[in-house]
Image (cartoon, rainbow, N blue to C red):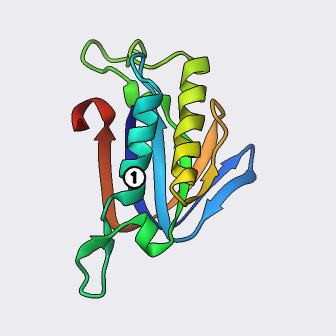
Amino acid sequence: MRIVIQRVSRAAVRVNDVLHGEIGQGLLILVGVGTEDTSQDAQYLAEKTANLRIFPDKAANMNLSLLDTGGEALVVSQFTLYGDCRKGRRPSWHLAAPPEIGEQLYEEYCRYLAEQGIHVETGVFGAMMAVEIHNDGPVTLVLDSKELR
C-alpha cells in the first residue's frame, strides 16, 4: 500500500458537490492499494500513521503524533498512487489492485486507524471527489508498506 500523508489545519471531501467528510487539525491521507497488498499492509500503515510524530510540541519540534494531539484523519482512496509512468505518456494502472480488493483494503485501513483511537472521516471509494486541503507546514510524507519493513 502507498499512502500520502499531509498535515492539515482542516480538510474536506465532496462528492457531487455534497460534503461527505470533514476534519479539523489532523491528517489528510490518500490511500492507494497495489496488486500484492494484504490486510497486513493496511494494519501496518494504520499503526504507523497513528504514531508518526509529525506534529509540533511546545518547542516547535516534530515530536507529537496524531494520537498525542487528538487530531482527526480524512482518508481518501487514490488508486492513481500506483500509476506507472515509466513508458510512454499515459500512466499504466497495472500495479493498482482491482477495485474489489482495493476497496476492501482501503476500508480495512480506515477501520484499523479508528481502532487506534483516531476519529476517521472518509471519501467514497471509486467516486470522483473534490478534496479541499489546508496544508499545515506544509508537511507531506509518502509511505509505502513494501519499503518500510
Amino acid at dot 1: Thr
* 139 in relation to 100, above or below: below
Q: Nearer the viewer, residue 57 or 22?
A: 57
Secondary structure under the numbered disc 1 in the rendered image: helix
Q: Residue furthest bottom?
A: 58
Residue 38 spot, x, y in % from top left: 44, 24
- The N terminus appears in which quarter of the rendering? top left
Asked whether, in this view, residue 54 is left or right of residue 80, the answer is: left
Place of residue 85 in the rendered image (x, y in percent of width and height, measured from the top left): 30, 21
Image label count: 1
Residue drawn where x is 31% and y is 65% of the image: 54
Instruction: Identify the residue under disc 1.
Output: 49
Which residue is drawn at the image coordinates 37% and 66% (left, top)? 65
Which picture quadrant has residue 94? top left
Image quarter in which the C terminus is found: top left
For the point 30% across and 81% down, the residue is 57
Q: Position of residue 64 (x, y in %)?
A: 33, 72
Quarter occupied by residue 142: top left
Residue 83, compared with residue 51, is above or below; it is above
The crowd level at tag 1 (other Cα within 10 Å; few <14, some 14-19, many 20+) is: many
- Percent from the top left, x then y, of residue 33? 45, 27
Q: Is residue 135 above or below residue 59?
A: above
Q: Closer to the camera, 99 or 66?
A: 66
